[in-house]
Image: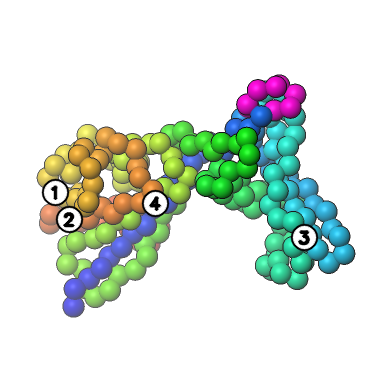
């Protein structure tokens, strides 16, 4: 039986997502960043929720609407408690989702994120006996501007020069990619085929980094 050993990396930006919009105090467009705090308003059995942002220049607050008049019974389990306690993970998730939204509010523009990042890794499965070919799927939901060689080098614990040599040797094969893909920022998603040549060095590193060893 042929195998499918598959790893998934998700690139998560270390930069606080910002939304550019007019600041009433500064009088110009400014970057607003999440405070990590929510504002809630209950009206009977319905709930309004906002994520509070502050202008980076003058600290003026702005409430970004998350939802309005939502029946409390339709909230998922634990969501109300997370909103009430200003859960950091939930606030960060809403902030990142807001900056990726394609439905901008009037006067607002989205921003990309800079190159500071970390990787969330997992091994998603293996079917049958390993045959020497492995898939590495890299996703970039935050639109991080890091170069692909930087990401692969960080994920595998190798130098960028070593990553380039492995690519030239065919051990890292990027399908359906543009010319010199390692030197370009990572796209939203791509797949790299790992073709270890005898020593399984790359696969072993992937397993170790994913915590599956």
Q: Are marks 2 and 1 in contact (CB under 8 Å)?
A: yes
* Relative to 75, 208 lies left or right: left
The residue to which callout 3 is attached is: 69
Alpha-carbon neighbours of circle 1 within 10 Å: few (<14), some, or many (≥20)?
A: some
* Relative to 38, 183 lies left or right: left
The nearer-to-camera label among 2 and 4 is: 4
Q: Are marks 1 and 4 in contact (CB under 8 Å)?
A: no
Report the predominant secondary structure element of the magenta stretch. loop
Residue 200's place in the image compared with 39, above or below, is below
For the residue pair 119 and 90, the one nearer the viewer reads as 90
> Mark on residue 96?
none
Q: Quadrant of residue 136?
A: bottom left
Q: CA distance from mark 3 to mark 2?
A: 53 Å
Q: Quadrant of residue 45?
A: bottom right
Q: CA distance from mark 4 to mark 3?
A: 34 Å
The residue to which callout 1 is attached is: 170
Residue 179's place in the image compared with 56, above or below, is below
Going from N to C along the chain, the mark reached first, 1 or 4, is 4
For the residue pair 34 and 154, the one nearer the viewer reads as 34
The residue to which callout 4 is attached is: 139
Range shown magenta: 23-30
Alpha-carbon neighbours of circle 2 within 10 Å: few (<14), some, or many (≥20)?
A: many
For the residue pair 73 and 161, the one nearer the viewer reads as 73
Q: Tell me the element at label 4.
A: strand
The nearer-to-camera label among 1 and 3 is: 3
Q: Tell me the element at label 1.
A: loop
């Amino acid at each position: 039986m042929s195998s499918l050993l598959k790893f998934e990396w998700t690139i998560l930006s270390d930069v606080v997502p910002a939304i550019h919009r007019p600041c009433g105090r500064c009088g110009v467009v400014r970057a607003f960043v999440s405070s990590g705090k929510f504002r809630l308003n209950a009206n009977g059995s319905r709930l309004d929720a906002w994520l509070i942002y502050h202008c980076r220049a003058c600290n003026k607050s702005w409430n970004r609407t998350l939802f309005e008049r939502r029946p409390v019974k339709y909230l998922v389990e634990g969501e109300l408690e997370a909103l009430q306690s200003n859960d950091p993970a939930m606030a960060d998730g809403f902030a990142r989702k807001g900056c990726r939204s394609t439905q901008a509010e009037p006067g607002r523009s989205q921003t990309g994120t800079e190159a500071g990042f970390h990787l969330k890794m997992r091994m998603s499965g293996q079917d049958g006996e390993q045959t020497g070919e492995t898939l590495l799927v890299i996703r970039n939901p935050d639109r991080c501007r890091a170069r692909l060689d930087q990401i692969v080098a960080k994920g595998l614990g190798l130098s960028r020069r070593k990553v380039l040599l492995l690519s030239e040797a065919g051990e890292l094969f990027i399908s359906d990619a543009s010319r010199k893909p390692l030197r370009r920022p990572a796209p939203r998603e791509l797949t790299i085929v790992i073709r270890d040549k005898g020593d399984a060095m790359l696969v072993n590193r992937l397993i170790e980094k994913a915590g599956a060893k």
